Amino acid sequence: MKTPSLLIPLACLSLLAACTVAPGGGGGSSSSESSVSSAQSSAQASSFAGWQSFSDPEQNYSLQYPPTFRLETQKQTIITQLTGAVLHYPSDFQTGTAYFEGTIELTSEQQTCKPVTSVMLSGTPAKKTIAGTMYVTQSGADVGAGNLYQTYDYTTIQNGMCHHFTLTIHSCNLGPDCGTGHTQPLQKEPILNMFEQILSTVQFAPTPTASPAGSAASEMTTSMSAKAGTPFTITLDSNPTTGFSWTPSYDKTMFALDSSTYIAPNSSALGAGGQAQFTFHALKSGTADITFAYSRSWETNVPPAQVRVYTVTVK
């Protein structure tokens, strides 16, 4: 049996610029709307009653799955070299059809999603939101010796981690290749619906918060010199695919910001970080700080993940 690739091609890069979609906001809700929401939540909780739980503290997520599924934990796969686990559909999940087996591979990798060209994932990438999380989805198929392998990959970047949830459906071509007991066409929809129902239970841990600005753990200070009226540049590592960006603060009677640009990485790896470049010029002589905070714009009342302070002496 061929092992499907879990890596996604370069076409997915632009779709993963923002991978978390917050639930819809708005004004206040009426009591009837609250009742409907409460009823929906109760119905959802009931539908997952008796399900098993799986959590991966190293990759900061958890999910639930039906008790008839078999969980196999793994630290690496031969093809991808990623940490993760495998959920196996029960062998009798669909009887009488061309269905042989179904698996969901759960894999995660640090920082970037490595792109490859894969026959198994040759479809056009699309975006889909499930339970408030945006995924890049892609599908593909491969055949061999009367067997058909259909793959559906759902990928999301959360807290700097790239997470793949990859469903592979193994079926046969109806006829002699199928053997006895497989007389009806494969029904994909129930298998896909169960896959997405499992994905709806995925919970990602909150972004770890850094120590408040000013502490030794979060702040780094660099001294530099400049000449009044002459431009100088400060360059910082940055990765906008995580939602973080650098924001400078400074004495505007001392410095003027001429430009700020993002320099894309040379690497073709999905989610790879580049550099943020800020060009200032000093308005007068003296010594003052330019402080950069690395944070997400929508996270209010949260300390920045990193702080960089540049003490500039202008002559």
Image (cartoon, grey):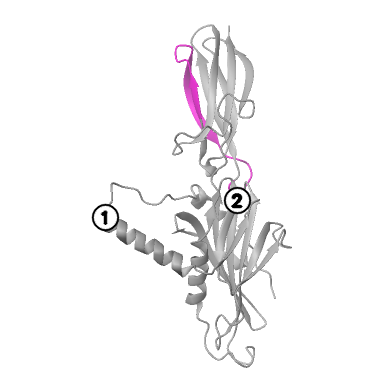
Q: Position of residue 268 (x, y in %)?
A: 62, 48
Sooner in the amino-acid sequence: mark 1 or mark 2: 1
Q: Position of residue 197 (x, y in %)?
A: 49, 67
* Residue 84 appears left or right of 294: right
Residue type at tag 2: Asn
Residue shown at the point (44%, 35%) measured from the top left? 300
- Quarter of the figure that contains the C terminus: top right
Q: For this rendering, which residue is in front, 51 or 162?
A: 51
**Residue at the spot of label 1:** 31
Is residue 91 part of the magenta span, yes or no?
Answer: no
Q: Amino acid at mark 1?
A: Ser
Residue 149 point in image, percent of width and height: 61, 75
Q: Can you give x and y, in whole percent of width and height, for residue 29 in the image?
A: 28, 51
| Residue 116 makes an appearance in the image | no
Q: How many marks?
A: 2
**Neighbour tally class for label 1: few under 14, some 14-19, many 20 plus, Cα within 10 Å:** few
Residue 119: quadrant of the picture: bottom right
Q: Which mark is residue 191?
A: none
Q: Identify the residue position indicated by label 2 in the image.
A: 60
CB atoms at circles 1 and 2 under 8 Å apart? no
In reply to whether residue 258 is colored magenta, the answer given is: yes
Quadrant of the drawing holding the N terminus? bottom right
* Disc 1 secondary structure class: helix
Query: What's drawn in magenta, residue-wise?
Result: 247-271
Q: Residue furthest right?
A: 78
Nearest to viewer (mark 1 / mark 2): 1
- Residue at the spot x=54%, y=22% of the render? 291
Tell me the element at label 2.
loop
Residue 46 as seen in the image, left or right of residue 222: left
Q: CA distance from mark 1 to mark 2?
A: 35 Å
Question: Residue drawn at (51%, 35%), measured in percent from left and top?
Answer: 295
Which quadrant holds residue 144? Answer: bottom right
